[in-house]
Amino acid sequence: MVLQAIKYARGQLEILDQLKLPHTEEYDHVYSSTDAWHAIKVMRTRGAPAIAIVAALGLAVELENMKLPSIAEDVKVFIDEKLTYLVTSRPTAVNLADAARKLRKITDEAAIKAEANGVDVKNAYIKAAEQMLVDDVRDNEAIGEHGAEWILKNTEAGQKGQVSVLTHCNTGSLATAGYGTALGVIRSLHSKQSLKHAFCTETRPYNQGSRLTAFELVHDEIPATLITDSMAAALLRLKGPTEHIAAIVVGADRVAANGDTANKIGTYSLAIIAKYHGVKFLVAAPRTTIDLSTKSGKDIVIEERPGKEITLIKGPRHDGVSLDLNVVETVSIAANGIGVWNPAFDVTPAELVDGIITEVGVVEKDSDGVFHLDQIFSGEDHT
Ligand code: MRU
């Protein structure tokens, strides 16, 4: 069975509640842009592409089920205001802002057509939002293929036919419309029988690795091992038959024009240890994550989340022998009164990144160490 974080049919949207994973698989209805905003804010849905798609489809469902104004301009203004609101849900991932920009353009064009009415504008919006769901899966499959090929060609283990890789956070079916980006590369290596072993970090504090990536790896029966974030450097020293990491592959929330990459907190440390150990460090992301209007990582706003995500931990009761899924407990794991800093993301400088895997190929630096990301948008509207 294929893992699905987003279930959509026209007028209906359900999301897998990621706060309850891995122990409980429960879908929640999203009826409106307000529902979508809250689901994104509290991270019932998360991951840069999934955030954009849930926001876009949340508004599509609202439009489909509401009594619409008949005047095209009124519907356009309504959509515009809702998109502005949705973009405020989480600041770092750029995919939602990118989706909002594209959806706005499409509704603007629909509204100025001669004799356009409210339904025409609504239909244009819904069609475009639905297409985003389809495009994301297609793009992820292409990312998986390009990334797998690159690793097999550019690493010593890859040239011998099989690689072990390390990933961080969750970038799979749960973070996208399906298949995933960095986890898509792992899926693709696995499907080619070229994956020896996948390692995933726990990804403190929200544990996207241990709760979500591990869940996906187990679900797909991919040979995999979980480590805590602090074990990554020790792992990279190992040269065992399985524990010999050829590449670290991560996703991204925003890639600046110069290749600086904002991704889940801890990514930067992984890039540093990759460089020290001579391990390839790759960012896998669709072009919707690349933001040419952000010149460098210095311009990326890093979301800070509540301190209780670090000091408290939640899960089903465990009596030492078995889990009781009916009782969810919250336990404090820090000294009361301690101050907390909880940035959700960090920025990895482009100089530590060996390649950016996109749906149109892997972008590498030129001989001066510069990424030319604008070249993968040639002929496309990126205004
Ligand atoms: O805070 P999250 O869980 O939304 O952060 C997710 C990540 O950092 C992912 O690595 C990134 O969004 C890429 S998902 C394909």
Image (cartoon, rainbow, N blue to C red):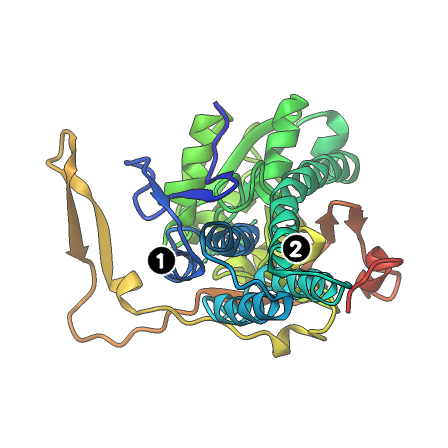
Pointer 1: residues within 10 angstroms few (<14), some, or many (20+)?
A: some
Residue 84, percent across and down? 54, 71
Residue 364 image-quadrant placement: bottom right
Residue 284, percent across and down? 66, 49
The residue indicated by pointer 1 is 205
Residue 258 image-quadrant placement: bottom right
Task: Identify which residue, 264 or 131, lies in the foreground.
Answer: 131
In the picture provided, is 86 more to the left or to the right than 365?
Answer: left
Q: Is residue 339 above or below residue 140?
A: below
The residue indicated by pointer 2 is 120
Residue 307, percent across and down? 29, 69
Q: Earlier in the sequence, mark 1 or mark 2?
A: 2
Report helix, strand or loop for mark 2.
helix
Disc 2 Cβ-to-ligand 1 distance below 8 Å: no
Task: Identify which residue, 32 or 341, lies in the foreground.
Answer: 32
Residue 249, percent across and down? 61, 46
Residue in the image at 48% along x and 44% along y:
11
In the picture provided, is 250 more to the left or to the right than 345?
Answer: right
Residue in the image at 72% along x and 34% along y:
145
Question: In the rendered structure, which amino acid carries the disc numbered 1?
Answer: Pro
Q: How many marks?
A: 2
